[in-house]
Amino acid sequence: MKPGRSSLLAPLVGLLSVANGISLEVSSLDSIKSVTSTLAYDMMTYYSGNQTGQTPGILPGPCESTACYYWWEAGAMFGSLINYWQYTGDDSYNPVVSQALAFQIGPDENYNPPNQSKNMGVDDQAFWAFSALDAAEANFPEAGGDIPSWIALAQAVFNFQQDLWDDATCGGGMRWQVYSFNAGYNLKNTISNGGNFQIAARLAYYTGNQSYADWAIKMWDWMEGSPLFQTQDGNLYIWDNTDTNNNCTDVAHYAWTYNYGTMLMGAAYLYNYTDGDPLWEQRVMSILKGAELLFFPQEYGGNIMTEFQCEPAANCNNDQSSFKAYLSRWMAVTTLLVPSTYDMIMPRLTASAAAAAQQCTGGNNGRMCGRRWYSNFDGSSGVGQQMQALSVIGATTIHAGIAPKSVKTGGTSKQDPDAGNDAASSPVKPPSAITTADKAGAGILTVLCICIIVGGSMWIIL
Ligand SMILES: *[C@@H]1O[C@H](CO)[C@@H](O)[C@H](O)[C@H]1NC(C)=O
Ligand SMILES: *[C@@H]1O[C@H](CO)[C@@H](O)[C@H](O)[C@H]1NC(C)=O
Ligand SMILES: *[C@@H]1O[C@H](CO)[C@@H](O)[C@H](O)[C@H]1NC(C)=O
Ligand SMILES: *[C@@H]1O[C@H](CO)[C@@H](O)[C@H](O)[C@H]1NC(C)=O
Ligand SMILES: *[C@@H]1O[C@H](CO)[C@@H](O)[C@H](O)[C@H]1NC(C)=O
């Protein structure tokens, strides 16, 4: 009997689905380890900072072109690799991570390196501080030598940012940019203030020092009283930024996963730090409910994380293409710090992980990930796309054994509450090396981004 057409084709189809893309079994730890190992490898093909003659800690840039990554995203990437090590036990990247986190500290030991001044935001520093906190909370090996400890680095960033509190406008909060000559200095945005809130909350948790918790509460209260937070029809909306030029009387109505994520994370640490204060549990729940409403749309089944502001329109920039990584990682930690959230969070991480994996079928190697987890490969690839898939798939392995450590539960990173305080550089004193061309470049970029985002978001406000 001659084989029919379909029986000839069938084995070919089978082969193709193995050769093309990655195959994930979400309930199998071995499968998760193998898939995340591939994703981490492919992510790190973008990084050459550990090679001879390159600068450790920097992704391709500078950002006058489109194929570039700002400094903060590299900092965030190293944190995702610390979590990867915790999720899987694979320590292959630990030396690269350690080298990068140590190299970018800057002369004042507070993640404010002069090379980055022309774009230096409170949020940019926060992402490097988050990675230092990830390292401390994981007992990630210290860099050693005269490099400050991981927790001291986070304390140094906290100390630096304390001086940026600005009562002169909007009744408080922090401006986005550290230096007044940078575009965006007029804005007070959620990721900067919420990033500082998260740092303070995590320092309170790690050190047990109430001063950090007091600061986090002060920040929360300011944000809650500002237009960045809005409650409507019983739902909490966390908007992106407000403008000091009109004393923060209006707000830019767009919603991003990482803004919800950073508030969720800070609130979860404070819930745990206060040994279960119901007020913080209620805040955790309201952020989660808001996130679920916006970022897990029913039209894609209700469990698949979606950056709805830019994925459907295919106009996410490189920053935005990484945001779901942070919400994924932070939701996973929330299940440990606030155990009552587990049943709400886990089904969404699991469904998102499966969805993320099935679309990693692109690029030259046939297994690069795009941004849209709710569809087939969308044709985009980059560090953020890889990091998002790596993070959400890894996050499904979350378990009590990797709960963030503190001094009470075996954290060994050595505290220095005064870290960075003898720093020479004042946050308000601009460095001199900025050229007019640099300023213009940064300004144009910011204006472009804001136009696109505002346009893309109109439909949710109306
Ligand atoms: C740089 O890091 C990669 C892992 O991302 C590793 O494979 C490579 O050997 C490292 N190169 C050097 C020169 O250390
Ligand atoms: C700053 O830039 C210079 C010149 O590119 C480089 O040699 C140096 O290593 C950079 N420092 C940091 C901390 O990135
Ligand atoms: C600016 O806003 C703050 C906080 O809402 C308020 O206390 C202050 O009076 C306002 N200042 C001006 C000049 O309107
Ligand atoms: C607690 O934190 C505050 C704020 O940084 C600091 O001034 C104080 O020295 C710390 N206390 C201890 C005991 O570390
Ligand atoms: C705080 O987090 C730890 C570690 O995950 C957990 O064991 C503990 O139950 C949490 N505390 C509360 C009050 O939920």
Image (tube, grey):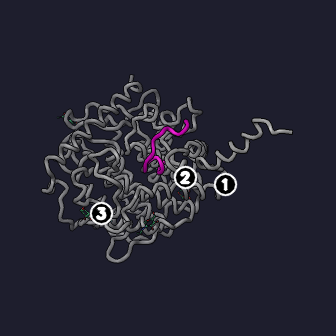
Given the current orientation, which residue lies at the most extreme top position? 462
Q: In which quarter of the image is residue 221?
A: top left
Left or right, 370 with respect to 54, comes to: right
Residue type at mark 1?
Answer: Ser
Secondary structure of residue under mark 3? helix
User: Looking at the image, which residue is at 52% across and 52% down?
Assistant: 390
Q: Where is residue 364 in the image (x, y as percent from the top left)?
A: 50, 48
Earlier along the polypeptide chain: callout 3 or callout 1? 1
* Residue 163, numbered label: none
Residue 350, position as x, y percentages in the image? 60, 46
Closer to us: 233 or 35 = 35
The magenta segment: 375-388
For the residues marked 3 and 1, what is the alpha-carbon distance in whole angstroms?
Answer: 40 Å
Asked if 220 appears above or below 47 in the picture, the reply is above
Residue 28 is marked as 1
Say which amino acid is labelled 2: Ala
Are the residues flagged by discs 3 and 1 in contact, CB closer than 8 Å? no
In the rendered structure, the answer to whether residue 349 lies left or right of residue 11 reads left
Residue receiving disc 2 = 395
C-alpha span from label 2 to label 1? 13 Å
Instruction: Give the quadrant of the N terminus.
Output: top right
Q: Nearer the viewer, mark 2 or mark 3?
A: 2
Marks 2 & 3, CB-CB < 8 Å contact: no
Q: Where is residue 316 in the image (x, y as percent from the top left)?
A: 40, 38
Q: Which circle, 2 or 1, is nearer the viewer? A: 1
Q: Mark 3 points at which residue?
A: 156
Q: Which amino acid does label 3 sit on?
A: Ala
Seen from the viewer's position, the closer of residues 112 and 448 is: 448
The image quadrant where one finds the C terminus is top left
Q: Counting residues from the N terminus, which is met first, the one under dot 2 or under dot 3?
A: 3
Q: Does the residue labelled 1 lie within 8 Å of ligand 5?
A: no
